[in-house]
Amino acid sequence: KAGVTQTPRYLIKTRGQQVTLSCSPISGHRSVSWYQQTPGQGLQFLFEYFSETQRNKGNFPGRFSGRQFSNSRSEMNVSTLELGDSALYLCASSGDRGYSEQYFGPGTRLTVT
Amino acid sequence: QKEVEQNSGPLSVPEGAIASLNCTYSDRVSQSFFWYRQYSGKSPELIMSIYSNGDKEDGRFTAQLNKASQYVSLLIRDSQPSDSATYLCAVNEKGGATNKLIFGTGTLLAVQP
């Protein structure tokens, strides 16, 4: 089975711009969660999508948004980028149950200058 | 009090020894617990999941869970230099209604040849 894929792997953006990241989960998985990892804050939950619906949301500003398509692929968008948004953005794929094991993709490294 | 706490390390053990990694959590209703390994510059890799009190063994890895003490640990037997990485403890939030994971800050393990 193919693993979780994320594109692009690296991004450099300027403050004020917006960015869209993409994630394709493991085949058959309908839940996609997004996390932000920074040296200072560690791994923090952004949101989870299941069957095209946002099932849970973390404590991030409204500039962070996401969506999920009917094929379970998910995108997250960050608008009006700030320097502090520089991070590794990770997507995790899991099965239907709320306590399922989550498998991470390779991540997208975003640098905001 | 942080929701999931780990000793940041580094934890240094000689090759062939047992490495013991510990994690405490604050949410008593948590039902699922995970250990991830993260090599520098890579994404987290799931190595163990545990849902019931007691021990769960998988190869050289043993996860231990004590819900009464709100404590989960990971033992790595016959440690190898390739085990050198950051180990992240993750707890499913609020009993697992969704896939939101709360992560500890991770313990850096260094296995000395």
Image (cartoon, coloured by chain):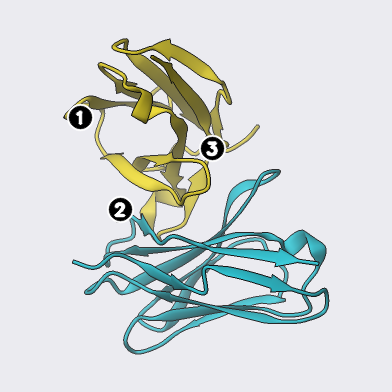
Chain colours: A cyan, B yellow
Judged from the image, the secondary structure of the residue bearing numbered disc 3 is loop
Judged from the image, the secondary structure of the residue bearing numbered disc 2 is loop
Q: Point out which mark residue A29 bears.
A: none
Same chain assignment for discs 3 and 1: yes
What residue does disc 3 label?
B104
Q: Is residue B32 left or right of residue A106?
A: left
Q: CA distance from mark 2 to mark 3?
A: 17 Å
Q: Are marks 3 and 1 in contact (CB under 8 Å)?
A: no
What residue does disc 1 label?
B56
What residue does disc 2 label?
A101
Judged from the image, the secondary structure of the residue bearing numbered disc 1 is strand
Q: Residues within 10 Å of mark 2 (few under 14, many from 20)?
A: many
Percent position (x, y) of residue B31? Answer: 34, 43
Q: Are marks 2 and 3 in contact (CB under 8 Å)?
A: no
Q: Is residue A24 left or right of residue B106?
A: left
Q: Is residue A3 above or below residue B70?
A: below
